[in-house]
């Protein structure tokens, strides 16, 4: 999308909200992602000239799509017949009526599945999704992931070239493939969120823009796949985590742990929406990892003070999660709940059984449990090990503070 | 429709195949080939002799230089392949999964250039 320049905020907002639907619709009509992007860009340029004079049309998305379609056809005509024949053959159309799978057919949804196809490298999936679905520009995406613009541009170009060469289909997968393929889409959305939640490098420790993009994507997915409980779960999870954002970073820039956060700063609107979604998940009764993590976060956001947290509920939910996902990281989180429930000694015993020495949250958790047990020399060593593994400034500041507080 | 190369790789470290043990694999591959033909996806397929049977020719200079052995010295080598017709990558990946099961090995999928 071209830089919005000095356009008024509402028009910029429209471009942003409509971009994915316009590109997706053009991609379906032309069967070519590059052409779709170029045509959508030209339509936006035309809108930037016309709308401030003529006013915003009643259906701006439809106007942009129609204009983009015309621009795309002009472009095809300008190019050689050989080239346009290539373009027509470039990407697989699926114009057949959707099978009766209960799946909502939407151009944006087709595009999301194309962008998150398992044949593309995970880093390319994230970049393409941000570019085509959220409409972030290449420089914005490059900045978000702290890679040079040329690297990001190359990553996106390569992925689009593979989509074209290998004929990655432009459609929603068959119903029997859908759960597996939706998981890849959710993973991309959650990756975007997590990169925002705790930026892995750079001076900004929290990237609100990425968290908000991820939430926006999940909202869109929920409209498109309303019957997928994990989609609802992921949206709820991100809302409940993001609700705590205003309390997460202190005035000194250090991260504030959950039990020390000023809970009055939490965003009530997001908490309430998240709780409603968790209840909706419970009603569907098809639990999955995102739903369980959302439920765990709901237990936290339900407690007015840290002391009122229902730790037995948290530990039980982590137990359920461990049954689905028997990873040591889940076991580590369960141990944290066990520490609150049964004391740090039992928890430390659980933590020490996990082979996670290279994972800084394991070191940090261990350090905290040792600190609470009064084993300060060991705690200090564990804090040092954790700090050595960290590349996030706010988190390093927090752990250094904890370490300095030891006797 | 597009054409895809589905290739199966072997390793010099693989133990020499025991014919009796391989028999079920040959049969599974034959059944898979029959299915490719029946569904109109078949273009060509074949298994290759071991890499020791390879000879490399380079005629970029004045005369053709013939050397014993593969072009690239590697532990892995092409063992066999299918060329199939498929509507798109998902269809090709679906065939590749069936081929992988049949030949008991990983299958690499690559699109052919068109025209």
Image (spheres, grey):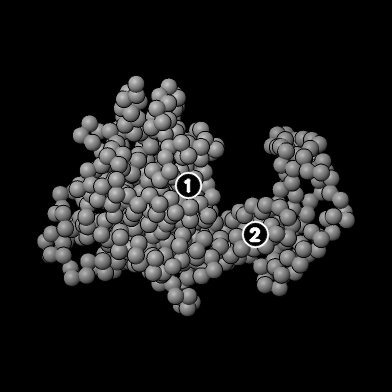
Q: Are marks 2 and 1 on the same chain?
A: no
The local crowd at label 2, few if under 14, some if 14 to 19, many if 20 or more residues have their Cα within 10 Å, is many
Toward the right, the furthest residue is B20
- Does residue A36 appear in this view? no
Classify A389 as above or below A325: above
Q: Chain letter of disc 2?
A: B
Classify A150 as above or below A225: above
Q: Nearer the viewer, residue A28 or B102?
A: B102
Q: Secondary structure at mark 1?
A: helix
Q: Nearer the viewer, residue A32 or A372?
A: A372
The local crowd at label 1, few if under 14, some if 14 to 19, many if 20 or more residues have their Cα within 10 Å, is some
The residue located at (22%, 43%) in the rendering is: A262
Label 2 sits on residue: B96
Residue A269 image point, x, y percent: 22, 57
Badge 2 vs badge 1, beta-carbon distance below 8 Å: no
Q: Nearer the viewer, residue A161 or B67?
A: A161
Q: Chain letter of disc 1?
A: A
In whole angstroms, how far apart are the C-alphas of marks 2 and 1? Answer: 34 Å
Label 1 sits on residue: A330
Residue A52 image point, x, y percent: 13, 59
């Amino acid at each position: 999308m071209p830089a919005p320049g000095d356009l008024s905020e509402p028009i910029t907002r429209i471009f942003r909200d409509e971009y994915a639907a316009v590109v997706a619709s053009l991609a379906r009509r032309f069967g070519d992602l590059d052409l779709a992007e170029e045509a959508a860009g030209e339509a936006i340029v035309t809108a930037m000239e016309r709308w401030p004079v003529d006013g915003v049309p009643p259906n701006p998305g439809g106007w942009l799509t129609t204009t983009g379609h015309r621009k795309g056809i002009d472009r095809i005509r300008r190019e050689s017949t050989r080239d346009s024949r290539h373009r027509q053959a470039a990407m697989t159309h699926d114009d057949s009526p959707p099978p009766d799978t209960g799946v909502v057919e939407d151009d944006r949804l087709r595009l999301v599945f194309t962008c998150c196809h398992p044949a593309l490298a995970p880093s390319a999936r994230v970049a393409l999704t941000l570019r085509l679905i959220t409409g972030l520009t290449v420089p914005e995406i490059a900045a978000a992931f702290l890679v040079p613009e040329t690297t990001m541009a190359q990553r996106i170009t390569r992925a689009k070239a593979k989509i074209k060469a290998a004929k990655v289909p432009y459609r929603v997968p068959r119903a029997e493939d859908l759960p597996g393929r939706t998981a890849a889409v959710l993973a991309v959305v959650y990756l975007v969120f997590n990169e925002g939640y705790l930026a892995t490098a750079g001076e900004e420790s929290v990237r609100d823009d990425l968290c908000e993009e991820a939430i926006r994507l999940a909202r869109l997915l929920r409209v498109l796949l309303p019957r997928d409980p994990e989609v609802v779960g992921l949206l709820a999870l991100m809302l409940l985590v993001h609700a705590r954002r205003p309390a997460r970073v202190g005035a000194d820039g250090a991260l504030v742990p959950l039990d020390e956060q000023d809970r009055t700063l939490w965003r009530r609107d997001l908490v309430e929406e998240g709780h409603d979604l968790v209840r909706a998940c419970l009603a569907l009764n098809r639990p999955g990892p995102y739903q369980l993590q959302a439920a765990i976060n709901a237990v936290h956001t339900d407690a007015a003070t840290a002391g009122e947290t229902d730790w037995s509920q948290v530990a039980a939910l982590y137990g359920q999660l461990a049954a689905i996902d028997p990873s040591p990281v889940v076991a580590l989180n369960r141990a944290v709940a066990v520490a609150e429930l049964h004391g740090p000694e039992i928890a430390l015993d659980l933590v020490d059984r996990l082979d996670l020495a290279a994972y800084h949250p394991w070191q940090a958790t261990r350090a905290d449990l040792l600190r609470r047990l009064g084993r300060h020399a060991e705690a200090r060593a564990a804090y040092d090990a954790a700090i050595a593994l960290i590349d996030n400034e706010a988190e390093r500041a927090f752990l250094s503070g904890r370490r300095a507080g030891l006797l | 429709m597009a054409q895809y190369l589905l290739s199966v790789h072997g390793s010099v470290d693989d133990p020499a195949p025991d014919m009796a043990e391989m028999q079920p694999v040959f049969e599974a591959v034959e059944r898979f080939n029959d299915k490719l033909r029946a569904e109109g996806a078949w273009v060509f397929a074949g298994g290759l002799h071991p890499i020791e049977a390879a000879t490399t020719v380079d005629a970029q200079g004045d005369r053709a230089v013939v050397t014993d052995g593969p072009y690239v010295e590697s532990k892995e080598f092409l063992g066999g392949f299918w060329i199939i017709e498929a509507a798109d990558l998902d269809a090709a990946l679906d065939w590749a999964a069936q081929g992988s099961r049949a030949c008991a090995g990983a299958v690499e999928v690559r699109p052919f250039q068109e025209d």
